Amino acid sequence: MRYLQLSTLLVVLTVVLAGCSGGGVPDGTAAPSTDGADTTGQNDGGSASESDSLSLSAADSQLRAAGSFTTEWSYTIDGTDGILAVSDRYAVDLDANRSVERFSSSTPEGATGYEIFIADGTSYTRQGEGEQAFYQVSDQSPNVFQSATGRASGFYGSLEEDAQRVGRETFDGVTVTRYEYTDADAWQTYNQGLVSGTFDSDENVTVTDFEIATLVDNDGIARLTTWTLTGESESGETVSIEWRYSLTDIGSTTVEDPDWLAAAQQQA
């Protein structure tokens, strides 16, 4: 089994949050809400013991063997200055050498996004909508697999050893075991002085809740990893951060031509 001490895990989270609060595209993992993607609770009432310890396998070889998969990552800050939301979704068909990425970002000032479609060794990018759309065509990036799975690289297989086994449930049609870790005091103590920047706030923020949750299938693959951080500003306002990374449709993902492909080819 591979474990990280709590201090190491918090370092990873701090780096992720620091990258996000500056308005860039963060490289992190998800929020402890398991809403969406067919998650049905089947809590067996089990509590953590030594035999219930969390053990994650490296998914790369299994995903390559499956031939296709979909990853989706999202990150949301609900702070004193409004909501910042970022999402990035990849559908990857390794057997057909095709993929599509859809990225979006929104702030109180506005929204932006792009799509990248890759097929037959060529990459097509679209930015903008309608008459404002423009396209770029280039050789395929050699790192599609790494890009699609890289959002979880700081967490995959490395949750803190005190993660608690909660029970069994269903996610994306697969039976999974749910593990959770919660320690608001540890976050507050370790990151004193960094919390306000984490929430992109000029006010001091007191952390009131911190949770990491992961859903692990019988092959040891983390199908969903989420974390949430909630706090209260000096003015009494509730602020929160949610991060979510999912891995779905393993072996059944297909990638169709986007409806804008002809326009991109014509412009090129």
Image (cartoon, grey):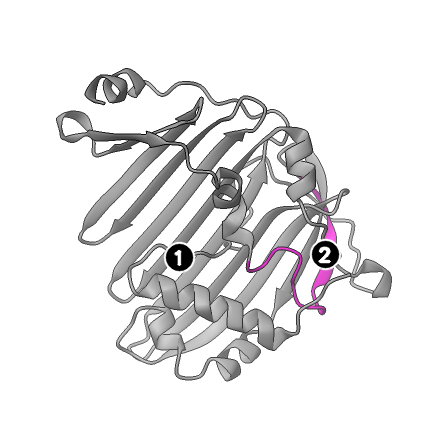
Give the mark count: 2
Q: Which residues are magenta?
A: 154-170
The three-letter amino acid code for the residue at tag 1 is Pro
At horizontal 58% and vertical 35% (from top left) the residue drawn is: 248
Sequence-wise first label, 2 or 1: 1
**Residue 155 is inside the magenta segment:** yes
Look at the image and say whether residue 71 sits in the magenta stretch.
Answer: no
User: In which quadrant of the rendered view does residue 83 lie?
Assistant: bottom left
Q: Position of residue 224 (x, y in %)?
A: 59, 47
Give residue 26's mark. Answer: 1
Label 1 packing within 10 angstroms: few (<14), some (14-19), many (20+): some
Residue ID for mark 2: 166
Q: Residue furthest right?
A: 51
Which numbered marker is on residue 91?
A: none
What residue do we see at 54% from left, 72% from top? 10
Instruction: Examine the rendered structure and indicate whether residue 182 appears above or below residue 41.
Output: below
Residue 267 is left or right of residue 119, and the answer is: left
